[in-house]
């Protein structure tokens, strides 16, 4: 009892002392106040000399380029310009790993990194999980906001808007293109294909047998198939999705595209049969002259050019009708994470803005093989010099004018899984193209029902 | 009085000693399992605004799972994978151990040759195997052609062969590991028993069948448990070689769990799969353990 009383006395004594101290304070505060009001300019200066802020950026490495070293260089430049900001880059594996890391951090109650580089197609998953913050206010605060957005290649902005808001800024982007061995084409008296028919015929003509080995006219990887398949559907006249809640896997044009893929081996004998799990070896086969054409990512250009001793042609995927072409964009965007403190989000935006300067966009493209995401980057001197040396870099950009939207929908993982399953069943010959796509459509609709009612 | 005193003195020490381990197990094994059991009764999907907050649905997730043809297929694949990998890698492990358990010059080299797959990280090993499995000119197809087989086999792209391909890699990876356990077991066997057998005129086969195998029984039980658990938990090579495809032909239980949790962001279903997983593993381990103890007694 006595102890408690002593404690109570002590605590209340401290309170009283604190109050007395506080009562003595007002005088200097009152004196200071007018000084601040007088010098409005000083307030502005104080804003510039800002509180130091450190934020993290989680990024993936998905290409064969020294991304970490390149980013560190940019961060040094950025910190020189914004001395109060420190950027901590965190390499986190591939795209799925970065997304997993962010998810587990947030689900575990932790503070997410302010900035992440995730797939452009992850948009709806990220919005639905309430992970990301819209960027409209930041863009509106820019001097040239409209010009800034308009300068990005339109194909790369396809997966950035939702619900009237802007959610991501293109960063490391690619496209589906076709690489062809221009020397082989010239030797055979062929020109680059302009339609499905001329494409299949060229592939057929360039397929040769050498002992036990077949040198295929075309390799078209389909181990994880939706991305490379999309240009076929677009080229047939109908992309596989209409909006975030509508897929059209069973559209006649899509079925025709599936059939064309199968015909390339079954009818023309110009391509290996079945599912081609050859993403990793296709580029080497092409660069060594074993295969005349491959459908692949624009990101493989640098590697192919390093190995190939022939003229490498790069073009969009031929469409069904004469003179039509198709492509689809890929790759990752910057997202600002909602769960990070506001000042870190603000600093992260400064970094995004900094890296979207044409000079940096051009430099990143040159050093990594990604397609420069902004039109003005192609006017940068460095890019002009680079393109004079490697004109194919411009071909990847040009392919994008034929691009449709990459598959990005509600419940993406599951719907994409369903599409992969049935597309591969058709490729493997277990189902006809029409049966497979009808089944894919009904399963996908069921999987999206909870999201789109 | 006396007994009470002894008890009091002895009681805390064992608990103190096992406390660090027990705390670790409680925190990183028991708690997650309990949490998974709890979560498996709720519907929760992180990528759906309506189901972001958990809603109680009783056994709904389990009903969904066991009426989903995909999940049934995954169970089938898992069984196929276990039957394909466990017995063969154990038998090979024992064979390798018998082979390298001799006093031959340069035996170290052979031991290394059998064991090195274990040291390689699974992802790099799988990347190397991807080239072995390449259609047309891959090592596997070249070997088949050498043996007179004509067609270009599409190992990882053919839905009927993809699971076989990942089984081959798992066997290659694991049998060297099991060899080490068998080798240790073999070298601990008492010499005298063999001397006695030799005196009695037992031939090599009799020695192996009647002496070595029975004496290695405990090792075999241990390896069987390890191999069984390995078969459930290794999916790195599946991710690299086939991504569970084509058409989910090579998706096994843990791969499906990863898909549900991180690709589909379905917390309820992934928790239910975890529970199924834990039940199967615990049931197997306990049965095996009880069996071995009973025979021992």
Image (cartoon, helix red, strand yellow):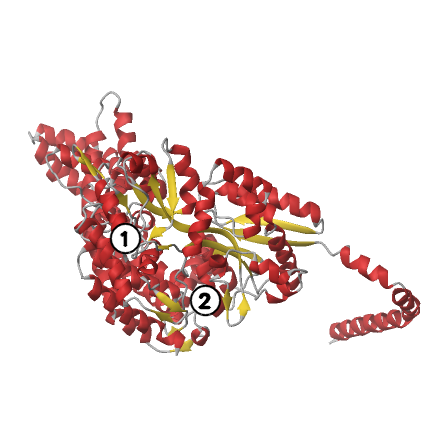
The disc label shown at residue A124, or none? 2
Image coordinates of residue B240 in percent, x first then y, are 33, 47
Q: Is residue A40 visible in the rendered structure shown here?
A: yes
Residue A405, relative to residue B93: is it above or below? below
- Residue at far top of view: B105
Circle 1 chain: A
Quadrant of the frame with the N terminus of chain B: bottom left
* Label of residue A43 in the image: none
Q: Residues within 10 Å of mark 1 (few under 14, many from 20)?
A: many
Foreground of the two, B40 or A164: A164
* Residue shown at the point (14%, 32%) measured from the top left: B146
Residue B34: image quadrant is bottom left
Front-lying residue, A242 or B289: A242
The answer to whether B150 is drawn above or below residue A332 in the figure is above
- Judge from the rendering whether residue B148 lies leftward or rightward of residue A201; answer left or right: left
Which residue occupies 51% across, 72% down? A163
Q: Position of residue B266 (x, y in %)?
A: 38, 67
B292 horizontally vs A72: left or right = left
> Dividing the picture into quarters, in which one does residue A209 lie?
top left
Residue A207 position within the rendered picture, expressed as x and y whole percent measured from the top left: 22, 40
Whether labels 1 and 2 belong to a single chain: the reply is yes
């Amino acid at each position: 009892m006595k102890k408690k009383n002593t404690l109570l006395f002590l605590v209340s004594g401290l309170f009283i002392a604190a109050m007395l101290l506080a009562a003595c304070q007002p005088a200097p505060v009152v004196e200071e106040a007018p000084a601040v009001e007088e010098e409005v300019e000083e307030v502005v200066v104080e804003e510039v000399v800002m509180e130091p802020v450190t934020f993290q950026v989680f990024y993936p490495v998905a290409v064969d380029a020294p991304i970490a070293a390149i980013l560190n260089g940019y961060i040094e430049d950025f910190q020189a310009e914004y001395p109060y900001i420190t950027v901590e880059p965190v390499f986190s594996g591939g795209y799925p790993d970065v997304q997993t890391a962010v998810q587990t951090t947030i689900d575990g109650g932790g503070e997410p990194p302010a900035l992440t580089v995730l797939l452009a197609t992850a948009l709806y998953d990220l919005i639905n999980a309430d992970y990301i913050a819209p960027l409209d206010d930041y863009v509106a605060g820019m001097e040239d906001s409209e010009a800034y957005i308009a300068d990005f290649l339109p194909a790369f902005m396809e997966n950035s808007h939702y619900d009237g808001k802007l959610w991501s800024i293109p960063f490391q982007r690619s496209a589906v293109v076709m690489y062809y061995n221009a020397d082989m084409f010239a030797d055979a008296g062929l020109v680059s294909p302009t339609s499905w028919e001329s494409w299949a015929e060229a592939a057929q003509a360039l397929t040769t047998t050498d002992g036990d080995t077949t040198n295929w006219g075309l390799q078209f990887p389909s181990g994880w198939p939706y991305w490379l398949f999309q240009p076929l559907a677009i080229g047939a006249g109908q992309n596989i999705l209409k909006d975030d809640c509508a897929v059209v896997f069973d559209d006649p044009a899509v079925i025709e595209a599936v059939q064309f893929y199968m015909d390339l081996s079954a009818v023309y004998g110009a391509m290996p049969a079945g599912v081609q799990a050859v993403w990793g070896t296709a580029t080497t086969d092409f660069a060594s002259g074993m295969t005349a054409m491959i459908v692949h990512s624009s990101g493989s250009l640098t590697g192919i050019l390093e190995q190939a001793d022939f003229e490498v042609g790069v073009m969009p995927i031929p469409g069904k009708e004469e003179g039509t072409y198709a492509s689809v964009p890929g790759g990752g965007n910057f997202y600002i994470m909602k769960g990070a403190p506001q000042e870190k989000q603000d600093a992260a935006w400064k970094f995004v803005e900094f890296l979207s300067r044409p000079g940096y966009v051009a430099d990143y493209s040159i050093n990594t093989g990604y397609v420069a995401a902004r039109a003005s980057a192609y006017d940068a001197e460095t890019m002009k010099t680079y393109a004079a040396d490697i004109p194919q870099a411009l071909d990847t950009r040009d392919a994008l004018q034929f691009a449709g939207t990459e598959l990005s929908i509600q419940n993406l993982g599951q719907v994409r899984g369903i599409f992969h399953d049935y597309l591969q069943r058709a490729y493997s010959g277990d189902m006809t193209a029409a049966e497979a796509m009808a089944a894919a459509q009904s399963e996908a609709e069921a999987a999206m029902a909870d999201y789109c009612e | 009085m006396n007994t009470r005193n002894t008890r009091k003195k002895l009681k805390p020490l064992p608990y103190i000693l096992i406390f660090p381990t027990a705390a670790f197990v409680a925190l990183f094994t028991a708690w997650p399992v309990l949490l998974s059991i709890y979560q498996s009764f709720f519907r929760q999907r992180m990528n759906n605004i309506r189901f972001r907050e958990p809603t109680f649905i009783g056994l709904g997730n389990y009903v969904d799972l066991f009426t989903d043809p995909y999940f049934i297929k995954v169970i089938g694949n898992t069984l196929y994978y276990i039957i394909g990998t466990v017995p063969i890698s154990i038998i090979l492990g024992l064979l390798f151990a018998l082979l390298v358990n001799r006093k031959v010059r340069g035996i170290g080299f052979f031991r290394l040759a059998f064991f090195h797959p274990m040291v390689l990280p699974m992802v790099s090993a799988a990347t190397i195997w991807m080239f072995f499995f390449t259609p047309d000119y891959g090592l596997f197809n070249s070997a088949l052609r050498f043996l007179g087989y004509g067609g270009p086999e599409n190992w990882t792209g053919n839905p009927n062969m993809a699971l076989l391909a990942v089984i081959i890699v798992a066997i290659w990876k694991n049998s060297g590991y099991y060899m080490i356990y068998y080798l240790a077991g073999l070298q601990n066997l008492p010499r005298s028993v063999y001397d006695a057998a030799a005196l009695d005129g037992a031939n090599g086969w009799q020695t192996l069948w009647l002496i070595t195998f029975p004496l290695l029984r405990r090792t075999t039980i241990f390896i069987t448990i390890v191999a069984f658990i390995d078969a459930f938990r290794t999916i790195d090579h599946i991710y690299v070689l086939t991504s569970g495809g084509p058409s989910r032909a090579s998706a096994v239980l843990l791969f499906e769990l990863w898909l549900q949790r991180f690709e589909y962001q379905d917390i309820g279903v992934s928790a239910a799969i975890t529970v199924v997983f834990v039940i199967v593993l615990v049931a197997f381990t306990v049965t095996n353990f009880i069996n071995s103890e009973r025979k021992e007694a």
